[in-house]
Amino acid sequence: MGTTPQRDWILHLDLDQFIAAVELLRHPELRGRPVVVGGTGDPTQPRTVAATATYEAREHGIHSGMPLRTALRRCPDAVFLPTDPPAYEAASQHVMAVLREHPVRVEVWGWDEAFIGATTNDPEALAATLQHDVRRRTHLDCSIGIGDNKHQAKLASAFAKPAGIYRLTSDNWADVMNDRPTDALWGIGAKTARKLAAHNLRTVAQLAAADPRDLARHFGPTNGPWYRYLALGKGEAEVVTTPWIARGHSRETTFTHDLTDPGTVTAHLTTLATQVAHDAREAGREITRVTVKIRTTPFQTRTRQTTLTTPTTDPATITEAAHTTLARHDLTRPVRLIGVAVEYAPTTSEGPEPGPTPGP
DNA sequence: TCTGGGGTCCTAGGACCC
DNA sequence: TCTGGGGTCCTAGGACCC
């Protein structure tokens, strides 16, 4: 029989409709109905958006990110459920544990995604085995993309939906990708696609053929050449199984009604700063920088930051830094959102790690 | 469609030092 | 007196992703 030699592959597993799927497992009676998950589940609450919507809800034009009030208007019969992050975390961990029982390397990428490194001569057979096992053990469907690197595998899993398997490697990259718009690439969004189009770079093929020096001039020394690298179907191929070490942490709140009283603003800031300091202590991390984010009525967002003289875990120091940073904001307009973000000192065990994005 | 929350990385300009 | 060039750190903003 035809023997294909073993080699390394990157798989990308994407759980289909993850949040909706978890909710439907808990509420089987809702299967087949339009369901929208978001916020506290109250669709009359302003400034709350959908985390996800089932296929039945999508048929009414509802999609994730849409305000719940709009979703309610489009589909008054829809069922609205609150988000339950701990439930999704638990379901995610179950899936990841199932994957790790197989002879593969698993890199968790959020709740509903994972990159999988494997050495095999039949990646489709491996993908099918993983799909069946995840389905059998967790009752969740997933799509799996197969590639030579993470970028290819990630795009392939989208082509595999729903619950399928798709292979996108350097062999078929040009055939599959060349005529697609540049924002089909993982890392190029609407804004960058528009800027590229202004330079007559509309398709993946055009971007791949562009001069890297021109790209560097127009889009920056790192990003410009990186875009072409993406268009050529290249990407990171190393699967990192060690847990991710966070660079920082943040908490923010959008108020259903704008704050106009300065005392209320500072009170909310204290709450957020205390929370963030507590989170950092919980994680055993020292804080080096504090950023205060303010969004005012015409949806204008501003940040001010303070670098601490000494890294600290002391909540009083963090809260005080947040307040002096807030004082540098212009607070003449009603406040829609307050956020506090902190940056962590690198952990002593290892220095700064290379990020998941850009590279050469 | 009046627009969430939590992350990561890059860029550009200015300060400051050698 | 007027000039250079490099390096690093800090700040604010922006883009992208889940």
Image: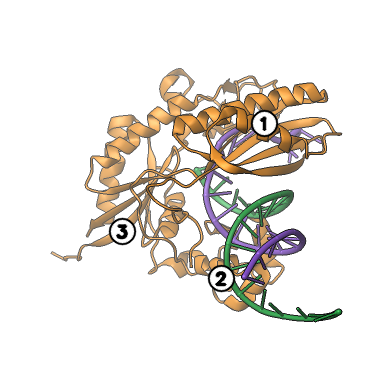
Chain colours: A orange, B purple, C green
Instruction: Label 1, secondary structure: give it.
Output: helix
Residue ID for mark 1: A320
Asked if the residues shown at circle 3 and circle 2 are in contact, with their CB atoms under 8 angstroms apart, the answer is no
Image quarter where the N terminus of chain A lies is bottom left
Same chain for the residues at labels 3 and 2, yes or no?
yes
Q: Image height check: is A7 above or below A65?
A: below
Mark 3 vs mark 1: which is more N-terminal?
3
Instruction: Label 3, secondary structure: give it.
Output: strand
Asked if the residues shown at circle 2 and circle 1 are in contact, with their CB atoms under 8 angstroms apart, the answer is no
Q: In which chain is the residue bearing label 2? A: A
Residue ID for mark 3: A9
For residue A331, side relative to residue B3 (left or right) = right
- Name the kind of residue labelled 3 in the image: Trp
Can the viewer see residue A46 in this picture?
A: no
Q: Image height check: is A200 above or below A266?
A: below
Mark 2 vs mark 1: which is more N-terminal?
2
Report the Cα–Cα distance between label 3 and label 2: 25 Å
Q: In which chain is the residue bearing label 1? A: A
Q: In which chain is the residue bearing label 3? A: A
Q: State which mark lies toward you, 2 or 1.
A: 1
Q: Quadrant of residue A76?
A: top right
Residue ID for mark 2: A225
Q: State which mark lies toward you, 3 or 2.
A: 2
Q: Which mark, residue A137?
A: none
Instruction: Label 2, secondary structure: give it.
Output: helix
What residue is drawn where x is 49% and y is 21%?
A30
- Name the kind of residue labelled 1 in the image: Glu
